[in-house]
Amino acid sequence: MKKVLSIGLSICMAAALFGCSSGAGRDTAPQTTASTEADTTKAAGEEAENAESASGDTTAAETKAEASIDDYVYDGDPIEIHLGDINSQFPLNLAYNLGYLQEEFEGSNVTFTMDYFQNGPAISEAFASGDLDFAEFGEQAAIAGISADYGYKIIGRNCDTETMYPLVVNKDITDAEGLKGAKVAVSVGTSAHYLLLTYLHSLGLSEDDIELVNTNDTVTLLASGEVQGAADQLAKFSSMIDAGDVHVLADGAVSETCQISAFVGRTEFCEKYPEITAKVLKVVQRVDDWMAESEDNQKKAFTTLAEITQREETWFSTMYSGSNFGINLTEQDLRVLGEVLEFMKSNDLLSNPDITMDDILELKYLEMAGYR
């Protein structure tokens, strides 16, 4: 039976209503009126000064908070912090391999190790056994692990990308009408499946308008003509796109959705060492800022990642082209996470279908780091 994706989150906003009331006497003497106006002007001036002072105090407090994280030095018992990565995620990987973490924590009684995993579920299991403190991987795998009570939460992100999992179709299909009745290959229950449903919705279609083919071998089926479209990693279709055999019909730019690389932290560690957690987030942001400075820096990042992961450099440049890097979760990210959560519930992909966004997210460390 086909499941229905519920798109959108309910947003509750509270408005504060301010009322002004005043009372005036019957005295109409000119000097009294002038005096009252002067007093009012003086009071308004003092109020403005107080507001400005308060604003200055708030800014100073925020600056002090950020500075305290930057200058924070851990001098307790030695800690070995375990980082996890798979061969398609970063920039935590870069923060470690370029020495940024070691540099930022110079003087602190901490060391870092980086462990590499084949996939998201393997990372989740390492968290469950207490062998990982921070990691980066796809949002669906992260949510599944949280549902299984593996002891971590999403505390930030590495990036989001609207182009990573497009809907690719053969050259004869040029619009939504041409897609009707087509066979479309996708791995059901994955990020690509969720995104495909959002693409169809943005095109005015639904899953009922196509013939969905559940497979992990999308490229072979599309190349052989057994299907007319496929949703999967963009890099898998590069050669077919370059040859002009297929093209991208829709991606996240059309549906205003994205695939999120989640940054997760082990709950027990983060609660025990909140300053370290916030500082790690700032180091990851430092890598993001460095990559955004120039194309040369981004190229250096992808070259470094290719050497570490044994992937082709073009894989990274293709998959992360136009990516929105940064540790803070955007409003779009939060909306998409809510939609993904509902998608996973409706497709029976969670061991605990009762989990909520509060169970998934912990944003206080981003606040400590000055990003929210």
Image (tube, helix red, strand yellow):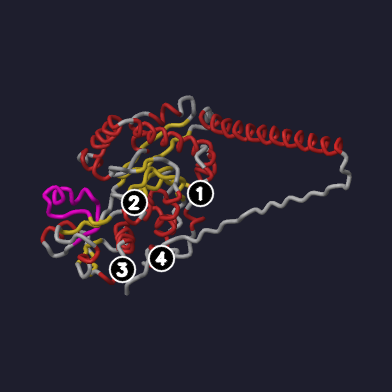
Q: Secondary structure at mark 4?
A: loop
Residue depicted at x 20% and y 65%: 178
Question: Looking at the image, can residue 67 be seen?
Answer: yes
Considering only vertical position in the picture, is 46 above or below 168?
above
Label located before the other in sequence (2 or 3): 2
Q: Is residue 158 magenta?
A: no
| Image location of residue 322, percent across then percent down | 30, 43
- Local crowd size for mark 2, using a 10 Å CA cut-off: few (<14), some (14–19), many (≥20): many
Q: Is residue 159 left or right of residue 357?
A: left
| Image location of residue 226, percent across then percent down | 13, 65
* In this view, the mark in front (2 or 3): 3
| Image location of residue 217, percent across then percent down | 19, 59
Considering only vertical position in the picture, is 118 above or below 339?
above
Taking the view exactly as shown, the residue that stands out farthest to the bottom is: 1
Label located before the other in sequence (2 or 4): 4
| Image location of residue 95, percent across then percent down | 37, 34
Label located before the other in sequence (4 or 3): 4
Proximity of marks 2 and 3: CB atoms separated by less than 8 Å: no
Question: Looking at the image, can residue 131 be seen?
Answer: no
Dot 4 corresponds to which residue? 6
Nearest to the observer: residue 80 or residue 262: 262
Q: Could you tell me the amino acid type at mark 4? A: Ser
Q: Report the Cα–Cα distance between label 2 and label 4.
A: 25 Å
Dot 1 corresponds to which residue? 362
Nearest to the observer: residue 325 or residue 132: 325
